[in-house]
């Protein structure tokens, strides 16, 4: 992908769905899957621009209860 404008919600959703399937369809991780997919797709589009990097540890992924945060 050549720039951020080519990254669509559809592309992010498809990548997040792959993570969901690969991890055995866990509940409560949709936000983490979405952010990971978005970060990776944007990284592919802007590999030299670290300004938009999202930290690997999001509130959802660091929650110990496994419940999705609101």
Image (cartoon, grey):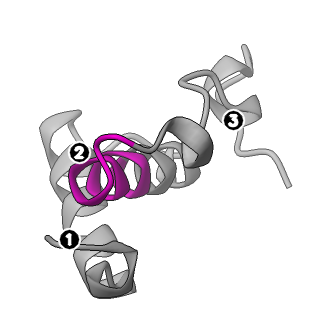
Q: Is residue 37 left or right of residue 55?
A: left
Residue farthest to the top, as pictured: 64
Q: Position of residue 5 (x, y in %)?
A: 37, 85
Q: Residue at x 15, y 53 (%)?
A: 18
Dot 2: what SS?
helix
Dot 1 surroundings within 10 Å: few (below 14), some, or many (20 or more)? some
Determine which of the numbered discs, if any, sits on residue 60 in the image. Answer: 3
Dot 3: what SS?
helix
Determine which of the numbered discs, if any, sits on residue 35 in the image. Answer: none
Q: Position of residue 27 (x, y in %)?
A: 48, 45
First in sequence: mark 3 or mark 1?
1
Give the position of the N terminus as an image quadrant: bottom left
Pointer 3 and pointer 1: residues touching (CB < 8 Å)? no
Q: Is residue 22 left or right of residue 7?
A: left
Which residue in the protein does label 1 denote?
14
First in sequence: mark 2 or mark 1?
1
Residue 45, magenta (yes or no): yes
Distance (Cα) linking label 2 and label 1: 9 Å
Distance (Cα) linking label 3 and label 2: 15 Å
Dot 3 surroundings within 10 Å: few (below 14), some, or many (20 or more)? some
Q: Position of residue 60 (x, y in %)?
A: 69, 35
Distance (Cα) linking label 3 and label 1: 20 Å
Magenta span:
37-48
Residue 39, magenta (yes or no): yes
Q: Residue at x 27, y 48 (%)?
A: 20
| Main SS class of the magenta portion in the image | helix
């Amino acid at each position: 992908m050549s720039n951020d404008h080519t990254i669509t919600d559809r592309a992010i959703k498809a990548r997040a769905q792959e993570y969901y399937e690969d991890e055995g369809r866990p509940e409560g991780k949709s936000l983490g899957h979405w952010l990971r997919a978005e970060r990776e797709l944007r990284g592919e589009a802007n590999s030299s621009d670290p300004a938009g990097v999202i930290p690997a540890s999001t509130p959802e992924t660091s929650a110990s209860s496994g419940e999705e945060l609101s």
